[in-house]
Image (spheres, rainbow, N blue to C red):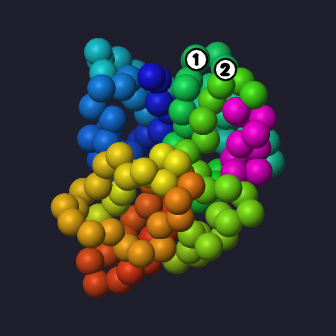
Amino acid sequence: MKILITGGNNAKALKLMKAFPSHFVLLADYGDVPGIVTENYAFSSLGVLNKDSIAHILLNFCITEAIDCIIPLHHYELEPLAKSAVLFGEYGIQVLLPDAAIIADYLTEEKLTYQNFAVFIHGDQIFSTREGSLPTNVSPKLNGVFGYNDETDDLKIFTI
């Protein structure tokens, strides 16, 4: 499986690679990106940032690069991609975000630092940086990468 993680110039994106050790990860960002290609991952540029056409830019990129799954990390990408998930799905690309109808429950305007993060696909936890119990607000169909802290019981979408 080929996974695209946006915000690839950020160290948080590199941390996410641990969740997908058996997949090829493409770390991409807008503007200049280092030209590094290895057996398990690569960096790529998404071109010039245009927030008005984020979903279109990312869909074209995913089709061109044969991406199977996209994990958006920029806050401004979240809602447009959640609303376009069905379109991405028609091209065989999974958008790893909650449904557009419930995504607001997992967003925060504040820039928060999380001690832990977990990855969910259809409600199943496939990776967590912390052993043991998870926060209780996990929906059975939850998709995405979520940050949380030990002292709180609240999942929020992991962004940069």
- 142 is higher (above) or lower (below) than 31: below
Q: Residue 25's spot in the image, x, y percent?
A: 40, 28
Asked if the stretch drawn in magenta spans residue 124, the answer is: no
The residue identified by callout 2 is 63
- Identify which residue, 86 or 18, lies in the foreground: 86
Q: Position of residue 40 (x, y in %)?
A: 30, 21
Q: Which residues are magenta?
A: 79-89
Secondary structure, magenta segment, majority class: helix
Q: Which residue is mark 1?
A: 66
Q: Is residue 62 positioned above or below 110 on the image?
A: above
Q: Residue at x 70, y 33 (%)?
A: 89
Observer able to see residue 108: yes
Q: Tell me which residue sits at (39%, 65%) in the image.
A: 147
Q: Is 116 positioned to the left or the right of 2 in the image?
A: left
Q: SS at mark 1?
A: loop
Label 1 sits on what residue type?
Ala
- Residue 37 in picture, x, y percent from top left: 35, 17
